Amino acid sequence: MVGDTNVRAGQCHCVTVRFEATLSDGFNSVRRCTCSYCRMRGAVVVMVELGGIRFLQGEGTLTSYRFHTGSAQHFFCSRCGIYTHHQRRSDQSLYAVNVACLDGVSPFDFPEVPVMDGVNHTNDTGKPTRRAGTLRFIPAD
């Protein structure tokens, strides 16, 4: 990890699941999504290539959830319930990792987060992924 800022340590809330994630493009891929599941979950995510997550402990404690087409697989800790990552539907060679699980990172560290249109998903429409808007964080005085 030393010298490689794209490798980040992470964990769930109860620290049962610990991992290292190699970010595909640093934090340049940060985003949210408007699909029904992401909208309820509210996580800000960053991309990691398939094989870019190395579990240090607790991988067997992860539970997964699939819905709609079953293509995307969402993982969360079965003890504390925290969503750690998911395999993406639109590009199954990528994981999206919850930035709030990465050590020293908060979703509020990003003043602007692109929000992708997951309601009109590219795999359903056949059209390119559309940006639905931007989530902004403006700190109080």
Image (spheres, grey):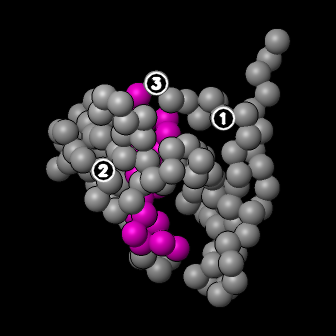
Q: Residue furthest top?
A: 141
Q: Residue at x 75, y 44 (%)?
A: 135
Where is mark 3, residue-wise? 104
Identify the amino acid type marked 1. Answer: Phe
Left or right of residue 133: residue 60: left
Left or right of residue 29: residue 75: left
Whichever of callouts 3 and 2 sits on the residue coming sooner in the sequence is: 2
Marks 3 and 1 sit apart, C-alpha to C-alpha, by 13 Å
> Picture coordinates of residue 28 (x, y %)?
59, 47
Relative to 66, say whether 106 is above or below: above
Relative to 15, say whether 71 is above or below: below
Marks 1 and 2 sit apart, C-alpha to C-alpha, by 22 Å
Relative to 8, say whether 121 is above or below: below
> Picture coordinates of residue 131 (x, y %)?
74, 63
Where is mark 1, residue-wise? 110
Q: Secondary structure at mark 3?
A: loop
- The reply to whether dot 3 and dot 2 touch (C-beta < 8 Å) is no
Q: Which corner quadrant of the image does residue 1 belong to?
A: top left
Q: Residue at x 35, y 45 (%)?
A: 21
Where is mark 2, residue-wise? 53
Which stretch is magenta?
A: 84-103
Sort mark 2 into few (<14), some (14-19) or many (20+) by Cα contacts within 10 Å: many
Decide whether residue 96 is among the magenta residues.
yes
